[in-house]
Image: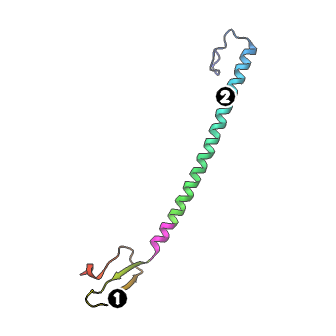
Amino acid sequence: MNNFLPFNTDNLPNRYIGIQIHRYNNILVDRITALEAECAMLRQRLRDSQDQGAELRVWIAQLLELPVIEVIEQSEESGTESDVEVDEGSNDSFTTAESEG
């Protein structure tokens, strides 16, 4: 039996062996072509996901650089409108006058 063929070649005519090799070669070519197409598809999906990841990182970075708007509410009894202060230095949280005490 030949080591590189998936079938026994002992006592077979050369013509038959040649036909079998040709068939086996065609099967391998078809499989390789299918694998190359799948690899190309996976490479494209990877590029797309990397592009989306980069866009998401840019969006998050832009979002984090925005100033935090702090809303300080006056008491409802006074009847005045709420003041809005923009704190450029802190990105921690939203606070209100009531929560500050």
In terms of image quadrants, where is residue 90?
A: bottom left
Crowding around mark 2 (Cα neighbors within 10 Å: few <14, some 14 to 19, many 20+) is few
Query: Horizontal and vertical percent for residue 34?
Result: 64, 37
Q: Quadrant of the C terminus?
A: bottom left
Please, what secondary structure does the residue beneath circle 1 have? loop
Please, what secondary structure does the residue beneath circle 2 have? helix
Point out the residue furthest to the right here: 15
Against 22, is 72 above or below?
below
Left/right of residue 88 with respect to residue 20 in the rendered view: left
Against 3, is 74 above or below?
below
Q: In the rendered structure, which disc, 2 or 1, sits on the residue that comes first in sequence?
A: 2
Crowding around mark 1 (Cα neighbors within 10 Å: few <14, some 14 to 19, many 20+) is few
Question: Which residues are drawn in magenta?
Answer: 59-66
Q: Which residue is mark 2?
A: 27
Q: Residue at x 25, y 88 (%)?
A: 77
Q: Residue at x 63, y 17 (%)?
A: 7
Query: Horizontal and vertical percent for residue 66?
Result: 46, 75
| Closer mark to the observer between disc 2 and disc 1 | 1
In terms of image quadrants, where is residue 25?
A: top right
Q: Quadrant of the N terminus?
A: top right
Q: What secondary structure predominates along the stretch shown in magenta?
A: helix
Q: Residue at x 57, y 58 (%)?
A: 51
**Residue 81 numbered mark, or none:** 1
Query: Horizontal and vertical percent for residue 68?
Result: 40, 77
Point out the residue furthest to the top here: 11
Decide: marks 2, 1 in contact (CB < 8 A)?
no
Counting labels gives 2
Is 44 in front, or is 78? 78
Left/right of residue 57 with respect to residue 75 in the rendered view: right
Q: Is residue 62 magenta?
A: yes
Left/right of residue 17 with respect to residue 69 in the rendered view: right
